[in-house]
Image (cartoon, rainbow, N blue to C red):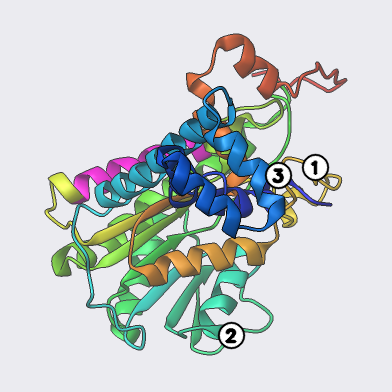
Amino acid sequence: MATVNDFLPLIRRTALNPVLTGALLGLRSLSPEQLNNLIAKVPKFLVPLIEKITSANSKLGVVLKVLFAWGALRIVNGWLNSRVLNNGVSDNTYDWSREIVVLTGGSNGIGLAMANEFAATKNPKVIILDREPAKVLPPNTYFYQADITDADAVYAVADKIRADHGSPTVLINNAGIGAGQPILSITEANVRKTYDVNVLAHYWTTKAFVPDMVKNNHGHIVTIASIASFISPQLMSPYSGSKAAALAHHEALATELRTIYNAPKVRTTSVHPSWVRTRLIDGLQNMNNFVCRELTPSDIATAVVNQVYSTRGAQLILPDAVFPISLLRSYPNWLQERIRCGGRGVKYEVPVQRV
């Protein structure tokens, strides 16, 4: 099924390309003689388009001006975003034969896909932290058993990793869990476990591995959050809340690296995928629709690994078509609620867990 996201690259290369729209607008500045000479040289099927663009009463000229401005603003905005997220400095010291990547939750799903993508490309050393090992580890990948919700266990395994391999330079907080239940039915244990894995573990891994990055002013921290960081739909309260908290932690860390720790070359990237076909959504039907298709772990892995190799920090919203959701809390309340409810009410007959 074709989706909006499939057409976005074409739209960016054409309608939102200020070089193209600017050139077309330039036709309006030609003298009648120059215009006639141009029409005589171009293929006949282009003549009506040129006449519409150059007509004083044509609305096409207004449309082109809007598209030119939009495309130009988009480029300037992207440049400013990149400059701010990377503190206006570059880091050309990366040597992928020497970099060490720590990847939580790397034994399955998105994490294992990232480990495989690293191995298939520049093959840096990858250290997986998980409760159980993958059935098959990619080349140059090592497994360390750890409960990332236990701070002392994380600190202990970090010491062992440094002793065995050296100080990691890339930290990918990928491990995550979630369950779809109404708030009045969910158990205390489920809520606590969700926040332990999706939020608190980020604090423990950050404290374990980031100090060496700060010391060397060299490193990259990647937070695998979710599009749910920006939206809290029904049945997803603990998951959405934890992903919003993970984003808040990530943003605070990025700010502190710049303002407190004076480590402007330590990069930060947050990743916000929509529906990804992993064990988290095994119980859900096919989520493909016209706005976006259901993603695969490989889709996320390719985007993340390429971003790490770029040595630049960023915010990745995947797929691009769901970007408007990241602006949800700026929308009018009536629109916010319609989006959260999917445009309709849903009735459930579920037991209520009372305190």
Q: Nearer the viewer, residue 222 or 150?
A: 222
Magenta segment: does it hold 254? yes
On the image, numbered disc 1 is attached to which residue? 289
Task: Return the residue found at the far front.
Answer: 33
Per the model, the C-alpha gap separating discs 1 and 3 is: 9 Å
**For the residues bearing labels 1 and 2, Cβ distance under 8 angstroms:** no
* Residue 117 in picture, x, y percent from top left: 56, 76
> Quick one: SS at disc 2?
loop
Residue type of the residue flagged with mark 3: Val
Of callouts 1 and 3, which one flags the residue occurring earlier in the amino acid sequence?
Answer: 3
The amino acid type found where label 2 is placed reads Pro
Q: Where does the magenta region start and end?
A: 243-257
Front-most of residues 305 and 252: 305
Q: Which mark is residue 4?
A: 3
What residue sits right under mark 2 in the picture?
A: 138
Q: Quadrant of residue 63?
A: top right
In the rendered structure, which amino acid carries the disc numbered 1? Asn
